[in-house]
Amino acid sequence: MAATLVGGAFLSASIQTIMDKLTSSEFLSFITNNNNLNITLLKQLETTLLTLHAVLDDAENKQINNLAIKQWLDELKDAIFDSEDLLNQISYESLLCKGENVSDQVWNFFSSPFQSLYGDLNTQMKNLCERLQLFAQQRDILGLKTLGFRVSLRRVTSSIVDQSFMVGRKGDKEKLVNLLLLDDGNGNCNVGVVPILGMGGVGKTTLAQIVYNDKEVEGHFDLKAWVCLSEEFDVLRVSKTLLESVTSSVWESNNLDFIRVKLKQSLKDKKFLFVLDDMWNDSYSDWHELVTPFVDGRSGSRVIITTRQQKVAEVTHTFPIHKLEPLSYGDCWSLLAKHAFGSEDFCGSKYASLEAIGRKIAKKCCGLPIAAKTLGGLLRSKVDAKEWNAILNSDIWNLPNDDVLPALLLSYQYLPSHLKRCFAYCSIFPKDYPLDRKQMVLLWMAEGFLEDSQGKRTMEEVGDDYFVELLSRSLIQQSSDDFGGQKFFMHDLVNDLATIVSGKSCCRRERGDNISENVRHLSYNQEEYDIFKKFETFYDFKCLRSFLPIGHWRRQCHLSKKVVVDLIPTLRRLRVLSLSSYRNITMLPDSIGNLVQLRYLDLSNTRIETLPDTTCNLSNLQTLNLSYCFHLIELPVHIGKLINLRHLNISWTNIKEMPTEILGLENLQTLTTFVAGKKEDGLSVRELGKFPNLKGKLCIQKLHNVIDVVEAYDANLKSKEHIEELVLRWGELTEDSQTAKAVLDALQPSINLKKLSIDFYGGTSIPRWLGDSSFSNMVTLFISNCIYCITLPPLGQLPSLKNLTIRGMTLETIGPEFYGMVEGSSNSNSSFQPFPSLEILQFQNMLNWKEWLPFVCNKFPFPCLKSLMLVQCPKLRGYFPSHLFSIEQIGIYGCDLLLATPPTLHWISSIKTITIEGDLDSEVSNERIQWSFLDTDSPCQLQRASVRCCDTILSLPKMILSSICLQHLELYNIPYLTSFPADCLPTSLQLLRIIDCENLTFLPSNMWSNYMSLMTLELDNSCNTLTTFPLDGFPVLQSLSINGCRNLESIFISDSPSLATLERLTLVDLPKLKLLFCEGACLPPNLRSFHIKSVRITTPVTKWGLQRLTALSDFGIGGDDIVNSLLMEKLLPISLVSLTISNLSEMKSLKGNVLRHLSSLESLHFLHCPRLESLPEETLPLSLKLLRITKCCLLEARYENQRGKHWCNISHIPVIKINGQVII
């Protein structure tokens, strides 16, 4: 059993992959029938690799302390990777022959055009064999041997602990001590097992030591023993150690049965406490064998186990598993400080200057006590702030002899070889980057990291097992996102570990890093404009396998076309290529078809229109992601040549029909969209029956083309048990409602479905299967534009439904059937509660809906509802759900009649966010309906409120004013709101936004100082009575924007210290405004962003103090006077990174050297300058990366010809954007 615990060397999996390929029947058949390949060299390659494989474990252990062996191993890694690439190239030729069905008889004819190719392959093989033989010769010189066991790198633990250094574990200690002191036994067993589970370095051992040495615990047990487990779980050794501890005697016998009998006798009728520290073995049989002698102990005996693996905890526990979380940042600092300053007062004046730095260092420890302790010990001899800053800005792994690396390295050392590759690959993702579980598996699959299960399981299932294994070992961690879903990430220190063990083969290009030419897997930070200079060094990376941009998915980015056309085709070993979110990519070059090793191609969220035919040459391709390519209208005709394609994501494309050859993709696991064709056009929906293994999402479009119901039955959706999300979309309404209903009935999915959408369905009712409680896995449901439906299915019966949206239906009443109260149903009993799990409910565009009937029974519906949105339900009035005890967010848009409903106090107390938007074009908008809905002054916990487009409001709703913790308030287009209440707004406000409220009188200035939390204030075309504004009125204001307040005459700028908080200031379209500076005052000193346009200049710009604004990076100026003054005086601060010049109605040119001194300027934008004819082309800053020209007709004409004489004067700027068109 011990052998299964020992992790293999990193390269073992790669060598095994090569061996599997060399011995596979297809490969052997290919090389046997091919006289052009040198079989002798292949045999030599196999033999040499096996020789090297034998010493890899020894080399991996010794590299930590032997630089020569580490260098040998690093260089060997490159040679083995090159061997993989070579064999992949040969395999591709084999695949071609298989695809062409080349027979033995015509082999010589087929192969003759490839003579030069095979000659090159033989040369590469010869060179590789010679390289590998050299490594084999060096193994003896380095003293490498074949190991029968692994050298232990663990630290040995004991029960002794210095409790004076315990921080942040009081609650954990109390909970565990209470479990130990319970005397009621645990079921039929006298021994209770308490596992402490957590990642490496989180303090499991320390906590166990603290509990073990607790005075109350010591007096409670007759016997105690502590065992630090070895890497190889040896029942004899553990049992013998326990026996020697409880008897205080040395036992020489190695007879396991004798030892177990003596241990059992020693424990009989004794209450004992054992700690088994750092357990890895998850075998139930081994565990049972160990604990059998414990059963005669007295009731209340306990065993504490510390482990990093979830499975170990699950196998051993009898009490609940105690999951130990990282320390808080404050506790981490306290622990670090104790080790750094000892017993001295670290908060005292002696070290006060170090505390701010120390807290930042503690934050880097990410809650790991072992990291805080190590860093604190290192800092103990350093009291100079410079030295502390050096540590702060250093990489923790560069610290000499630190304990962090061994603590985390142990988790890595235990990994099997195949998991080591997967773990190391994760290093290409930045710290705190959310890991997509499915994407990670697909990437591992593309890189060849997944072991073949010999047909027993799919590669995806194997990869998911790998992910779960890393998760159970705390090398990947899991949390919940804001929507209740799963989120995965790597702890920062674990990410550092992955970076170290991956060596030079994986690289995250985050800065100007030096990257090895032999790098295999590379990611980089995706920026809005990725210019070619960023990629110039990539030409050297001939071995590159992964090209992966890392950025925010929804961000619109642009990539130099030279990268796509020139660079990428040279990277012939690529297996993973992503160009996702580059919106300027509209086509791929034909040379993409030369990247024959490509297995993963992601073009999602680009503007690609078609794929070149050569894409079908990529016969190794497994994953093709084209989601959100809205401009894509067709797939390649010969897509059937992609014989290894398993995942085709074409969600949110505009593909018109499915190509016939797609039916040949027998390995397809994912097909996100299927367009149903007519009999004479495209593919029938019945063809879906030919894809039995589909998983994940499936959207069936154009169901109005399905005339024959048998076709829908033949799709056999009910048998596709792994489909989790299904979209049924008709595309256009059909008058044949009976056929539509029959088709929907025939398309009934598996009860495993989690998410369902129905759109443009033309039937008069929805089949009952939809509301059947057997769909117990359904979490999300969308029903849209089913305008002929006169009833809803009994959706309240769905037990797991969390998210429900009903949109565009013509129902007038929603009542009992919606809740699930239907004839013949058992739901009429008093215990039935509709929608027991629903958290989000939305009704949208329900133009005829008049009545929402209450649920009449003992239990209230919607017990878990958190968010309720009602959008464009103009006729709805009266009843509103009254007992929403969990509600946090309500949005009501265009439902003016409903707002007359009196408030329901049962949900007022829990609401946190409310948005009310009227309909100014509504037929009832002139009825002056009182908004009783919000007319309550009961105290509430409302934090965010938005009131928009309401011409019936004369005063703010009481509900908003009564909030004791209101933080954000937005008022938009409320024409008859004239004033705030006498006692003003809640002083808890952090943001106040007022837009298009011209008649509203602003807050009285004598009250401004009360708003000690207000950080953001925006006034846009509002508060016309406001004439003066003292800039220092709000004590902690950080951002101020005033736009279009036409009567504002003056802003007073004093030298008040409170102005130091202001970082963003925008003053636009204020025709009467004068900036008035008190004596000696200047602009706020910490401004980072300042935009001023269409403002009268009375105080000379030379007195503004612009050049003192060392933090100013974003500056926008508009109007001829102000621009002229600033540029002529060269007053722009050199800290500027972005400069916008706008609204120049008279200026024709910017003369002289007005911008040259801006040495940090990266972005320059000219906006609305109709007479501007030219730019200071010769004196533009050399730092400039982006030039934008918008609505400047003469400048556009000057630079419209990219081959003209003027263009060459600006062509050196990496990115030029003219009226939205990007030239990069």
Image (cartoon, rainbow, N blue to C red):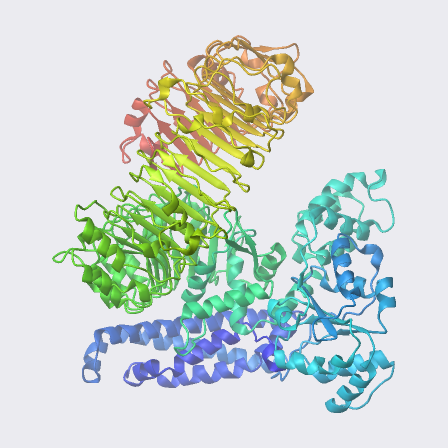
The count of marks equals 0
What's the residue at 76%, 51% (across, down)? 336
What's the residue at 33%, 22% (across, down)? 921
Residue 41 in the image: above or below residue 1106: below
What's the residue at 33%, 30% (across, down)? 1219
User: Can you tell which quarter of the image residue 163 is in?
Assistant: bottom right
User: Can you tell which quarter of the image residue 607 is in?
Assistant: top left
Query: Which of the two residues, 223 or 1051, is positioned nearer the viewer here?
Result: 223
Q: Say whether residue 251 is left or right of residue 681.
A: right
Q: Residue 212 appears at what percent x and percent y?
A: 81, 66
Q: Say whether residue 939 is left or right of residue 714.
A: right
Q: Say whether residue 412 is left or right of residue 1222.
A: right
Query: Which of the two residues, 1185 or 662, is positioned nearer the viewer here?
Result: 662
Q: Can the viewer see residue 239?
A: yes
Q: Residue 1222 appears at what percent x and percent y?
A: 34, 37
Q: Quadrant of the N terminus?
A: bottom right
Q: Can the viewer see residue 1154?
A: no
Q: Residue 1124 appears at what percent x and percent y?
A: 45, 15
Query: Which of the two residues, 883 or 295, is positioned nearer the viewer here?
Result: 883
Residue 1103 in the image: above or below residue 791: above
Residue 709 in the image: above or below residue 309: above
What's the residue at 57%, 32% (across, down)? 942
Residue 852 in the image: above or below residue 425: above
